[in-house]
Amino acid sequence: MAPARDDDPAASQADLYRLDGDENDPDSFRRWTIVRELAIEEQRWNTGRPLLYERANAAFLTDAREQDGFFYLLYAGSTETRTFSGRGHARLGLARSRDLVTWDVPLERE
């Protein structure tokens, strides 16, 4: 994830990158291109405050379209950065998308 500015809410999301170069060349793993932002809806437990760029952090994307038509994104989120060496009390989230643009997240319990 790229660093964000406090006044730039669009920078608070996970980014999808594509490897630049030959996957068989170890030096290629040093070069990546941003393909798109993965705009995950803010949730009460996933605000990323006070650091906006922590929302939907450490994302893992898997393509399950052959099984059920969806991409799935597993990610970590937090509402604070005071505990656990600045990472906060993290929770895991799961979102799904058919097109990598619109993401569905489970409804939150009250």
Image (cartoon, rainbow, N blue to C red):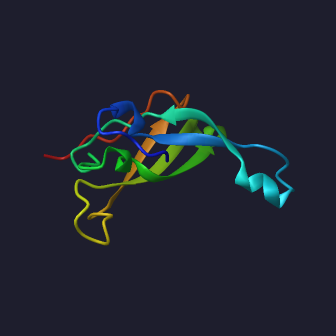
In the depicted structure, whether residue 70 falls above or below residue 83: above
Q: In this view, does 25 lie to the left or right of 35?
A: right
Residue lying furthest bottom: 84
Q: How many labels does the image show?
A: 0
Q: In which quarter of the image is residue 90?
A: bottom left
Q: Residue at x 42, y 40 (%)?
A: 13
Q: Nearer the viewer, residue 19 or 63?
A: 19
* Residue 3, x across and y down, in percent: 44, 46
Q: Residue at x 56, y 48 (%)?
A: 61
Q: In this view, does 39 lie to the left or right of 78?
A: right
* Residue 91, x across and y down, in percent: 31, 59
* Residue 6, x across and y down, in percent: 29, 39
Q: Which of 44 and 88 is in front in this view?
A: 88
Q: Is residue 110 left or right of residue 97?
A: left
* Residue 97, x across and y down, in percent: 49, 34
Q: Which residue is drawn at 37% across and 46% down?
A: 53
Q: Residue at x 26, y 45 (%)?
A: 47
In the depicted structure, whether residue 101 falls above or below residue 59: above
